[in-house]
Image: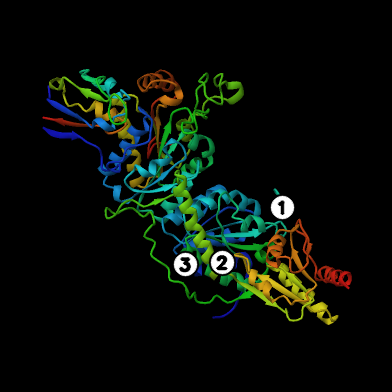
Amino acid sequence: MAVVFEKTTGLVPGKETHYCPGCTHGIIHRLVGEVLVELGVLDKAVGVAPVGCSVLAYEYFNCDMHEASHGRAPAVATGIKRVLPENVVFTYQGDGDLASIGTAEIVHAAHRGEKITTIFVNNAIYGMTGGQMAPTTLIGQKATTAPLGRTVEHSGMPLKVSEMFATIHGAAFIERVSVDSAPNIRKAKKAIKEAFQCQLDGKGFSMVEVLSTCPTNWGLTPVDSLKWLKENMMPYYPLGNFRRPGEDE
Amino acid sequence: MAKVLMKGNEAIGAAAINAGCKYFFGYPITPQNELPEYMSKEMPNNDGVFLQAESEVAAINMVYGAAGAGARVMTSSSSPGIALKQEGITYIAGAELPCVIVNIVRGGPGLGGIQPAQSDYNQVTRGGGNGDYKLLCYAPANLQEMVDLIQESFDAADYYRNPVMVVGDGMIGQMMEPIEFKKVESTRTLPEKNWATIGTGGTRKPNIINSLALDPQELEYHNHKLQRKYAEMKEKEVRFENYNMENAEVVIVAYGTTSRIAKNAIKALKEEGVNVGLIRPITLWPYPEKAFDEIPADCKSVLTVEMSEGQMIDDVRLSVNGKFPVDFYGRSGGMIPTPEAIADKVKEIIGGAK
Amino acid sequence: MAKGRVIFNRDICKGCELCTTACPVNIIVMDKTGINAKGYHPATVNEMDKCIGCANCATICPDCVITVERD
């Protein structure tokens, strides 16, 4: 028998992650690692880690890594890519990092068409700090800073990031995917590969929004979290492509 | 080399390019706008990159990224914009990266005013952001000195792997003086940047640029490492000018353009038979404590003159260490002290002492 | 049907059970007879002859616990 699946060299060998059991960060990290290896660019990859549960991502990706302050990864990545235009530069950010404190930085990186790739992990909550409300938290969803559940009157409707970016000209590739099932994970990998290819082709900014789970702060088992994602997040955050290079403005 | 007449803000840009700065990330704010504007034109002419960021916060983070990728990189701003950059600056210091930051100081606090001030002294000498760190901080008093120090600051930043701040004020930024751009002779041995994130090339383990250390002992060791750096700066980087100290009845302490106004006051007082000296710090950090050793034993007062409500005066008191009375004269909000007012203050001190 | 084989790195499994949702032939179970070095009941397969080597389990595993072989 031949080996058809083993841990990618895109992740640091022998390193176990600190993520909770069932946290989908582990899946997404692996997809990014696999894509960088398959595109043959791991050796020239430089990643920027966020603040959030994946703050320690710099210990897991097997390439040069840069730790950014909360929300600023796209600006850090811009600095790196402007110095090293031949390298493959990516950011890996959660929904607090990207859609709350970092909205200016991500919008402007896309607006300028910075040739970087952003992996946006959307689990509708602040994980690392213990379950506070995020801009992407759903209506009625409880969080430690919205103990009775999010309401529109107080906090507005959850932010649809991919839809927003569909209007930005410099955003060459925008797609929303999910990692709640093996088939969806394979589709997510395809989108991540397309996003990095978009950077290699010099088309502009690329981003993949990955619907993800947070069993610990959602108060659900990992298996039930997959179900919650499918039944609650996917109807509000539809999967699909929002921008592709060459498509009409 | 011939001298050129240049505006301060533009001279900073020219000096940086001359020192091999290839990346400039900035944002508009009065009174330093001529610098990003100059860079937007001249960087592309010099194989460099200029980018106007979406904010001062974004600009300093672009500097952080570029510095981590091994580049000679600079940003500039003015007081409120420097306040915005503090988060980025502390990360750069914690991650031990080199960069040059220019602060053309204006009146504060808050939005303040656009006229010259020196009310960022605390912001630039006490770290500025969170944590135990320092910036090597230069305060030139004229454009030639500004240009020479800008060129020095890139080498110093690379040598120490630390941000270097160059502090001017609205006058330095706007004035025009003749400047000679000397050939940059590096006096330091600069090691290779083998820590930079340029891609592993498949030949080494990943480089990680980071200021996070969750283990407290590890973070303490890291802080000790930073402190050793600052100890070396204290030993080697102090710069100051002492002027007319012999038999001085009063010694003024002033930096930047205030020191030039003070010198005019000193010249006027000399004609009236009053002998006044000047200690001019050129590094605000590390502070030139040893300059104070030259104060004559019978000096009646050490008079701090600042364009602020009194910030450097704390370091003056520490340096004087109780040996002499310390007095203060200052203007704030963008008001400029006059030589006459400084001279009157001296006479008031002497009159009172008699 | 392809013949497959899955190898679980028992001690790095966090017992999250995601793999049990992905297996099309439902052969993945949590080993309740013991705990691994982390203190979890690790995932395992007792009916390896039914494995088709589709790698769905490895695809959904967040911790790269599973290596998959196939004819």
Q: Amino acid at mark 2?
A: Lys
> Does B322 sit above or below residue C40?
below
Q: Secondary structure at mark 1?
A: loop
Asked if C34 appears above or below B261 in the picture, the reply is: above
The chain that hosts pointer 2 is B
| Co-location on one chain, circles 1 and 2 | yes
Q: Which of label 1 and label 2 is nearer to you?
A: 2
Instruction: Decide if residue B20 is on the left or right side of residue B195.
Output: right
Q: Is residue B185 visible?
A: yes
Q: Which residue is mark 3?
A: B20
Q: What residue is at 42 percent from the left and 59 percent from the top?
A: B70
Q: How many circles with numbers are drawn on the protein?
A: 3
Q: Which residue is mark 1?
A: B108
Q: Amino acid at mark 3?
A: Gly
Kindly indicate whether the residues beneath marks 2 and 3 are on one polypeptide chain: yes
The type of residue carrying mark 1 is Gly
Query: From the viewer's perspective, is B37 left or right of C20?
Result: right
Give the distance between the C-alpha atoms of the residues marked 1 and 3, in whole angstroms.
33 Å
Closest to the camera, between mark 1 and mark 3, is: 1
Q: Are marks 1 and 3 on the same chain?
A: yes
Whether residue B64 is visible, yes or no, is: no
Contact between marks 1 and 3 (CB within 8 A): the answer is no
Q: Is the residue marked by circle 2 packed among few (<14), some (14-19), or many (20+) residues within 10 Å?
A: some
Check disc 2 and report the residue beneath it: B234
Relative to B324, is B196 on the left or the right? left
Give me the chain letter of mark 3: B
> Which chain is disc 1 placed on?
B
Q: Where residue A9 sits: x, y (%)?
A: 26, 43
Q: Position of residue B197 (x, y in %)?
A: 38, 54
